[in-house]
Amino acid sequence: EAPHQVLGRLRFLLQCSECFRRAQALPAALCYVPREVQYKICKDPSAAAAARSLLSVWDSPGPARGGKRAARATIEVRKGGCLRATGEEYCNGAGLWVKLSKEQLEEHTSCRGLAEGWVLVQRFGEGGDKLVPVESVEKIQWQQQALGVDYKPAVSWEQVVDLTYSMRLGEKTRLVEQDEAAVQKFRYESVPLGWSYECDMELGRFLYDHSEKELQRGDCTKENLSSIEVSSQADDCGAAHLTDNQTYTFWESNGPSGQHWVRLNMKKGSIVKKLWLVLDGQSSSYVPRRVAVYGGPPNRLQHLRTVLINMNSYQDVCILHDMKTHLPVLEIRILECRDQGYNVRLRGIKIKSSWEWDLILNADMFQPARLVRYPLLERMDADVLYRRAVLIQRFVQLLDSVLHYLIPLTEDSIGTFNALRSMKPFLLLSKQSTALITHCLQSSESSPPHTLPKLYINRHLARQHCANPVLDPSCRNTVFTQLYESLRSSKNNQPLDYRWPLSHSQWWECEFITEGIIDNGGGFRDSLSDVSEELCPSSGDVPVPLPFFVRASNQGNSSSDTRDVYVPNPSCKDFPKYEWIGQLMGAALRSKEFLILALPALVWKQLAGEEVSWSKDFAAVDSELVKLLEVLEGVDREAFEFMFGRELTYTTVLSD
């Protein structure tokens, strides 16, 4: 991008971030919808040619898959003709819809009684004709005659953002007139009463949880296959054994060498992300050596991939991955077997896939059953959530384009760029999020120690201390302190900063006295589990063995729904050990080990540099205090004098 374009997008993102924080209407440029878009019909080459093109028209976006609502009218698009629609689009489980322009509706007598007319541009999971946007030749010629040969109007929301927020010399590119009603719907109806920044964060989490990589399911072969055909089969070794998930059955061909195949007829809308062959290793000559995969409509299969299978491997072999579109038929052709074998055996086929309609943002995603884990979104209208999600996707798309100018943010960025810190929840939706996290972790990595520190831990003494911590205020017998003291002596010889690569999954070697455990990783993880339990006991009926965290007031008051959390002890000043706890937390993040600490959002947000809300976040620690202070804030002077006028001091209890 040009420098002025980058700066313009940064200005735009800063304004958007402020609108998100304040739950205000987002900038009009982000909500831009062109007033008119022309479409032509793109015929399905696999279908029989039809003399006429008839399109069904609904008064609102039609029903999703399996719906029964009938269309209100039909219109005919002549050969070479175009359909005029507004730029407003709507996506649901049936497919992508566009809203017809008023002029288009008035041209057809069957549509004149409709306030709105919607047609299906592309149907999910099915072939058939589809509508594609085009530029009218007559319109382009007229514009160039009237406004100059170089006239190229801005027709997309990205272009509108760049034109609105970028500084440039000379005459600006003109904007195609916007659809005012659609823009207002985006700007204001997507911010309903009661909407907040927390709702946007929860919606971002919902979109991430329902993103492509999260929706890819495990083995879902039977769910996605409508039928299986094979070139031939031996007695009692039929095609049904390819999907029975049994380890003792298999399909065996019974035909000429080099002419064996398996044809998978896929259900409409399924998109294959991975396809495996499960090999039978009992007889080498029956194992395939070279396999080709073809896919597409039944009468037009195209070569997708040829795989040469390792001669020494009998594991599952991935022969296809990362398809982007639905393929009605997949054909696996066995070109060659090992040891010049004649026939082939396969124990099974495994498929990992997604549904086409799940990979595209659509209004049917926001069904009540899917929103159960997102309480802030449960009572919101699905159309409101859909429009808001479209705007978030647009925002993330622009954020992606300039992200490498913003990351990493330094602590000195307290000015304009620091405002983007509040957009961290949306980074999960970025296409660069995984690479960004990997880069940040790798850039701060250090070399792991050449030899693991060997520690001797006495868990019998630790259990005695946990039973009655009052007897030993120094807590020297806890697993935590034994680890800390042992590693500190090791640290004097070789610094340990715990910023090690992911591959360094064991940080020390444990030998538990009188227990006879040889540590191949299990003892190390046991010690981490013991440390977690000592720092934040999972049971509320036992004393806390260590002084670093104390139970939140909600546990003692039996109030709120967060009664199991702990907060840092304000009276504990042992900062070197707090630092070591932080190092363990960082090491667990890097290595994906488990260090279970029941801390509230109030603590996690401050560690992550996110903004803390007193009324929302502190309520998870002491909801009674939050309620009391809210009452005091609302008391007028006379009521305050009546309740507290004679009191000279105000006493409160510390969290410990």
Image: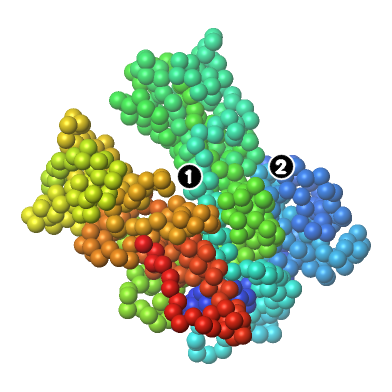
Q: Is residue 636 visible?
A: yes
As shown in the figure, which amino acid type bears the numbered disc 1?
A: Asp
| Residue 310 x %, y % | 33, 29
In the rendered view, would you say 333 is above or below 654? above
Where residue 428 appears, as percent x and y from the top left, is 46, 59
**Considering only vertical position in the picture, is 296 above or below 21?**
above
Label 1 Cα crowd, 10 Å radius (few <14 / some 14-19 / many 20+): few
Seen from the viewer's position, the closer of residues 616 and 558 is 558
Residue drawn at (45%, 60%) of the image = 553
Pick the residue in front: 593 or 400. 593
The residue that disc 2 covers is 47
Rendering quarter of residue 362: bottom right
Assign the C terminus to one quadrant of the image. Answer: bottom left
Sequence-first tag of 1 and 2 = 2
Of the two numbered discs 1 and 2 in the rendering, the one whose residue sits closer to the viewer: 1
Q: Nearer the viewer, residue 305 or 66?
A: 66
- For the residues marked 1 and 2, what is the alpha-carbon distance in whole angstroms? 27 Å
Q: Quadrant of residue 106?
A: bottom right
Q: Give the residue type at disc 2.
A: Ala
Quick check: 550 left or right of 615?
left
Vertical order, 407 against 131 (above or below): below
At numbered mark 2, what does the secondary structure look like: helix, strand or loop?
loop
Q: Residue at left 27%, top 49%?
A: 469
Q: Residue furthest bottom?
A: 170
